[in-house]
Amino acid sequence: MLDERTKQVLFAVIQCYINAPGPVGSRVVTKKYSFGLSPATIRNIMSDLEEMGYLQQPHTSAGRVPTDVGYRYYVDSMRAEQRLINKDFLLELNRKLESLRKDINAFLDEASKMLSNLSHYIGVTMSPNTSNTTLARIELIKYRDNQVAVILFTDEGVIKNRIISVDASLSQRDLNRIASYINSHFSGRTVEEIRKVVAKELAREKVLCDSLVEQAMTICGAVFSASPGNLYISGLSEVLALPDFCDIDRIKELLKTIEDKHVIVRLLDKIANAEGPQVIIGSENTLDEMKPFSIVASTYREGSRPMGAVGIIGPTRMNYLEAISIVDLMANYITEMLSDK
Amino acid sequence: MLDERTKQVLFAVIQCYINAPGPVGSRVVTKKYSFGLSPATIRNIMSDLEEMGYLQQPHTSAGRVPTDVGYRYYVDSMRAEQRLINKDFLLELNRKLESLRKDINAFLDEASKMLSNLSHYIGVTMSPNTSNTTLARIELIKYRDNQVAVILFTDEGVIKNRIISVDASLSQRDLNRIASYINSHFSGRTVEEIRKVVAKELAREKVLCDSLVEQAMTICGAVFSASPGNLYISGLSEVLALPDFCDIDRIKELLKTIEDKHVIVRLLDKIANAEGPQVIIGSENTLDEMKPFSIVASTYREGSRPMGAVGIIGPTRMNYLEAISIVDLMANYITEMLSDK
DNA sequence: GTTTAGCACTCTCGACCGTTGAGTGCTAAT
DNA sequence: ATTAGCACTCAACGGTCGAGAGTGCTAAAC
């Protein structure tokens, strides 16, 4: 719907702006990109683009700055076309993260740092949402008089442990029986499923014929609560080095938002079901606090089940192409890692 | 060594400055504190204090600002005297943290948030340094062919788990024997001790008479590596709201330092052996990056063994008295919690 | 001898220009 | 449809100026 030439001018402005913040004028566009047109013509085109909402002027007689709508158009046009597959990046990734494969939490922590290092924005990774993990095995170990350590092994290689209080009369043998009961019934099913079954079971007549089953259900009820994934955030200092954050109030806003991890978790949860990297640009954010920022995020999967998310948070003036490919690569890397475990 | 009256004036200036940043003049001192002296006299005293290095003038004909030396004198004088024991605070602490007692990591995360909420500075908590924790019990569980999940129970209620690779031929029975061997030999000793014994043992003749012992030692070697305590940091946004941080470069510096958690860990490790809350004021910091900031920190113990640290990081213009009592209270709370487990 | 009043002096801070330069919009010529 | 030319606009920069806060000094008062 946009003239090819007009499109090129729009992209030129956006690219200029991404490279260096500050309004971009008609002359620099003609200089940096050889359109074979004079500044005056470019001016006219830019004026059109402004009317259509893709660009805006901070004030009369200043250059143009892309709007969020402009970025959106840019991202959507470019997405399929260009994709910088960075071989070196993958190798680096492999080398650095190889040693951490066993511990997904340490891995994700490191991964968030890499995301931020590469992009120079904020890197975010979220560990698998427990409700989507599948139970491989459960172990119950008597810890103290009335305390039991519960060790959950999941297919994804995550281990969780919790200490719960139980009837002091339970012996380790009882616990073993309970564990094997749970294993035989629930192994291979997701936490979410288990939770539902248990809830139904517990809601039924309290007087379960078998006290073992009852004990098992109680334990499951205590253990299989959905807990949100852990969040790893890196690169705050990275982002502060950007000229976009010369304003102190923006930093405050950002930090306050980031510090409240629930917000980010919910945000990443939202994109969990989408395919491929998702891009949310500035005002497209539903959360007011995030409106000054853009997010590029993607989910990693185990099989077809979305497990967790990785993403990059930066200013709306973000290098979207780079960010998209970094996020995509990272998500795919983790997905593969999980599948050939 | 300081005249009582002079001392009072110094403290008055410091307190004024803590309440509101900006040079404090002689007139405001006479107004806020009734010394029964005229501004002129105060001026003379302040001039003396400047000469002695406790105060300084940002520029001629401006009010005075405390120097780090001044703060130090203030803190040392006040420390024993005044201590605001906040009953409400303790109750609140109890209520909020009661439910988290079982999981020390969640607890410490919450505790760091409370520290920052209460002080309006940055709250920091560090989980027990593993080398000081004592092993209560170890459990080995066969996980996959050549992988074993190692579950460490410590006296402090912390559980650690790791997955390590072992000889695939080991059966669960073998593992049980190895575990009980380790338990009988090492239970009750600190990770650090165990590490030393194991290292010695492994360094000896490779051909250990008993292959079980050898396996046990190998596993111990892999598991009992010292890992630094986890660090929980909260309240960055809190600190940005302070007028002290109007300067963007300071924020950047601070964030960069904080983000590199090793620095903070080392810092807290240093105070591990001191008694009571430690105060490091601005330029007293050995690390250049931390020189613009002050730290109030204390260790919590189990018995007499220092386990981890809690602290507050803020500007040199910090409410030291409040910070000290908050940190002290928190450290004591955790110490008690650990002892009556 | 100590304290105080008075006064001149210093320095920062914000307001208020005029200037500069980048960039536009318009118009008339190509 | 494009371009050259020109008048116009506006932020940014730098300098000046006055107000205000606070000091240091001196001489008088206690």
Image (cartoon, coloured by chain):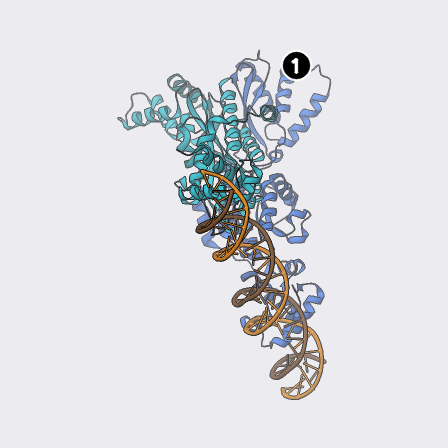
Chain colours: A cyan, B blue, C brown, D orange
x and y percentages locating residue C6 in the rendered image: 62, 84
The residue most toward the left is A205
Query: In this rendering, is residue A123 above or below B208?
Result: below
The residue pinned by badge 1 equals B210
User: Which quadrant is home to the N terminus of chain B?
Assistant: bottom right
Q: Which of the 4 quarters of the picture holds residue A215?
A: top left
x and y percentages locating residue B288 in the rendered image: 68, 48
Q: Sort mark 1 into few (<14), some (14-19) or many (20+) by Cα contacts within 10 Å.
A: few
Mark count: 1
What residue is rendered at 43% in x and 28% in y?
A: A130
Q: Amino acid at mark 1?
A: Asp
Q: Nearer the viewer, residue A174 or A216?
A: A216
What residue is rendered at 60% in x and 69% in y?
A: B25
Query: In this rendering, is residue B189 above or below B265?
Result: above
What chain does badge 1 belong to? B
x and y percentages locating residue B320 in the rendered image: 58, 56
Q: Nearer the viewer, residue B341 or B76?
A: B76
